[in-house]
Amino acid sequence: MFRGPPKSRASATTLCQKCLKRGHYSYECQVSAQQRPYKPRPSRTQQLLNPDLKPKLTTEVPNDLIRR
Ligand SMILES: [Zn+2]
């Protein structure tokens, strides 16, 4: 199943935490800082100032639970 020599121990499903691409670990990431998709988490202060940033509580039940 292997194609070519293994470059690293990372598998095809290994998710890089830096660029959010698969196939390598974050410490092996070759992308520059500019290429990284930066997803800032809203801080507690920002949540207080902007309620829209709060994680919404959902009352929806997944269909999987209903059909069982
Ligand atoms: Zn990466």
Image (tube, grey):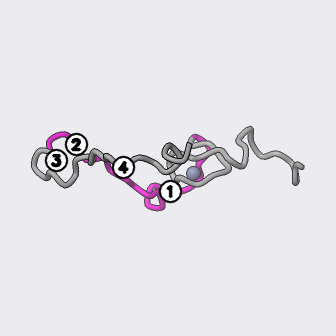
Whichever of callouts 1 and 4 sits on the residue coming sooner in the sequence is 1
Do the CB atoms of the residues marked 3 and 2 lie less than 8 Å apart? yes
Q: Amino acid at mark 1?
A: Ser
68 lies left or right of 1: left
| Residue bearing the label numbered 2 | 43
Q: Tag 3's secondary structure?
A: helix
CB at disc 4 and ligand 1 closer than 8 Å? no
**Observer-nearest of 12 and 62:** 62
Mark 4: give few (<14), some (14-19) or many (20+) Cα within 10 Å.
few
Q: Nearer the viewer, mark 2 or mark 1?
A: 2
| Residue bearing the label numbered 1 | 32
The dominant secondary structure in magenta is: loop
Whichever of callouts 2 and 1 sits on the residue coming sooner in the sequence is 1
Magenta residues (range): 27-45
Residue at 19%, 39% in the rendered image = 44
Residue at 13%, 53% in the rendered image = 50
Q: CA distance from mark 1 to mark 3?
A: 28 Å
Residue at 57%, 47% in the rendered image = 16
Residue 67 is situated, as x and y percent measured from the top left of the image, at 54, 47
Residue 60 numbered mark, or none: 4
Whichever of callouts 2 and 4 sits on the residue coming sooner in the sequence is 2
Q: Nearer the viewer, mark 3 or mark 4?
A: 4
Q: Amino acid at mark 3?
A: Gln
Whichever of callouts 1 and 3 sits on the residue coming sooner in the sequence is 1
| Residue bearing the label numbered 3 | 46
